[in-house]
Amino acid sequence: MSMPSASPLNKIYRGRVWVFGDSIDTDGIAPFYLYRDPEEMYKHTLESFRPEFPKQVRSGDIVVAGKNFGCGSARPPTPIFRIGVSAIVVESLAPLMLRNSVGLAYPVFIAPGVTSIVQDHQTIEIDYPNGVVRNLDTGRQVALRKYPPIVERIYAAGGIIPYTRQRYLQEQARRSP
């Protein structure tokens, strides 16, 4: 399937890595008690797992995590991207995190084994079109799991709301005389 070049799935991401473990929950990603003040919340993103992260993360960095990333409540990974992270690649995603990430067209990728090929602050490349994550410092790589065609179409549209709008307008045009 060919996607518009603006799709986050068509971009190749390169960046410095921050490695996190398994079961990174949504309360640790963005503390709920700070939800009323988003700017303050962003300053504490992932702080409960890596206290230095919100102060040292740089624009373009990439979060790598283990299994069950985003477990817990149904919150999207918005704070991670708002502080400059360019992409997230994980061993596996919690189902609600997967839905939220796809729905908002955030560049979140699944690559079983990814935590075994990287260490903190190494540089990786996420190449979705070719289905691979490469450690540019060591040459090691793992396969990236491809999304089903419907998910790729949602990403290409810019998320679930633009996708639904496009589908509605296409259907209306089809029904018009």
Image (cartoon, rainbow, N blue to C red):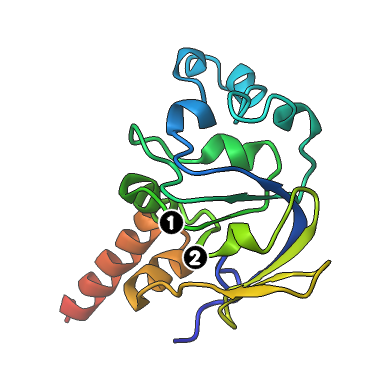
Residue picked out by circle 1? 92
Q: Secondary structure at mark 1?
A: loop
Q: Secondary structure at mark 2?
A: loop
Proximity of marks 1 and 2: CB atoms separated by less than 8 Å? yes
Residue picked out by circle 2? 112
The amino acid type of the residue labelled 2 equals: Pro
Image check: 177 left or right of 49? left
Q: CA distance from mark 1 to mark 2?
A: 7 Å
* Residue extending furthest toward the front: 116
Q: Position of residue 50 (x, y in %)?
A: 66, 30
Asked which quadrant contains residue 96, the reply is: top left
Q: Position of residue 40 (x, y in %)?
A: 63, 17
Q: Which mark is residue 73?
A: none
The amino acid type of the residue labelled 1 equals: Ser
Viewer-proximal residue, 87 or 142? 142
- Residue at x-position 49% and y-position 86%: 2
Image check: 157 left or right of 138? left
83 over 42 or under it: above or below? below
Q: Position of residue 168 (x, y in %)?
A: 25, 65
